[in-house]
Image (cartoon, grey):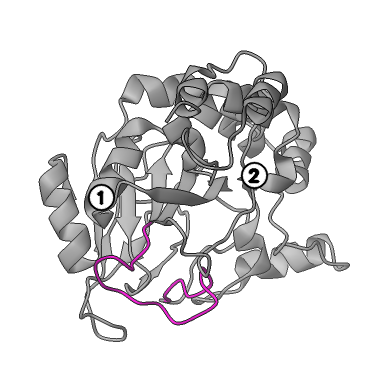
Amino acid sequence: MVTTDISTAVEQWRTQGWTVVHDLVPTEEIDAAVEELWGHFPHPVDYHSGNPAAQAQFEGESTDLRYQPTKQGNAHQLKDIQNEGAEFRLRQFLGHVLFPYDSYLLNRLQIHPNVVDFAKKAMGDEDIRLYQARIWGKYTGVTNYEQPFHQDRNHTIVPDRVEPGWWNMLGFLYLSDVEEGVGPTQILSIGDSPPGANPQSAAGRRGSYLAYRTDVWHRGVDLTREGGSRFLMNIAFKHAHHEWIGFDSFQQNANRGPWSKFAASCSPDELALFGAPRPGHPFWTPELVEALKERYQGIDITPWLEGLDQ
């Protein structure tokens, strides 16, 4: 279930429910963006050195609202780490940083053309939307990351319709090498379900993309490597106009500096991933195209101007 061939990966995702596309994003692009990752996360060396500032940065930077610090403080954390068995623990969800980031390269990586093109091919649709965008960092010792097998049913307000034309794609772009010892996802293929099934490891090099569907069973596993860490980027897609599917909201940050700089770099097709109307859409008027230019300084409005004549 690990391949560098796009056609094979598309077929695996459609028939088996998941695939790992190795080297989908070139290593040099990943490494360049990761240099800016440390503005959001402590470097693993600093975190594992016991540096209080580094540990506080990790605890404080998480923007995932499912994590709420408890009043028990360190006593709760120790219990959480030592508690054995596969469970969902609050501290497993530390380390989520929501898009847009204070990093141009990381923001551009979120809509990397290779990932978007793969999603379009697998889903069989040119008009898709990005609906989950965040970075997730883990460090050995933060908690016991061992989870039970589960299906991600929290991306839709109605039952999933898992067939061509209706399915959505969940995925992780690996920002670091996700090897045994640093928590590669364990996953089952379509038709297999726990207990009794033999899970496979979704390990992959940085630049690889784990794509899976909502109807596959999977689970997070613990980080056991001393001084270990794992970083990935959530990138999930749905078909356009499937409003019942969602996770992250982008409009709430659309007037922030990081978004403005990112949007100014986007083509019409890239902005359409977030739901922006393409050139030629009835929404656009000469005044609105001019307002787009004012809002996102430096954006090339030529396609929108040409669309006014259509």
Residue 23 occupies quadrant: top left
* Residue 198 on the magenta segment: no
> In the image, is 305 to the left or to the right of 128?
right
Which of the pair 21/45 is nearer the observer?
Answer: 21
* Residue 157 on the magenta segment: yes
Residue at horizontal 36 percent and vertical 58 percent from the top = 169
| Residue 205 visible to an observer of this rendering | no
Name the quadrant of the N terminus. bottom left
Against 135, residue 185 (above or below) is below
- Magenta residues (range): 150-169
User: Could you tell which of marks 2 and 1 lies nearer the N-terminus?
Assistant: 1
Callout 1 amino acid: Val
Q: Position of residue 73 (x, y in %)?
A: 84, 62
Which of the pair 104/143 is nearer the observer?
Answer: 104
Residue at horizontal 44 percent and vertical 63 percent from the top = 220
Badge 2 element: strand
Badge 2, how many Cα within 10 Å: few under 14, some, many 20+? some
Q: Which mark is residue 97?
A: 2
Callout 2 amino acid: Val
Query: Which residue is identified by label 1?
Result: 20
Asked if the residues shown at circle 2 and circle 1 are in contact, with their CB atoms under 8 angstroms apart, the answer is: no
Residue 159 occupies quadrant: bottom left
Q: Position of residue 28 (x, y in %)?
A: 35, 19
Badge 1 element: strand
How far apart, in angstroms, are the residues tagged by discs 2 and 1? 23 Å
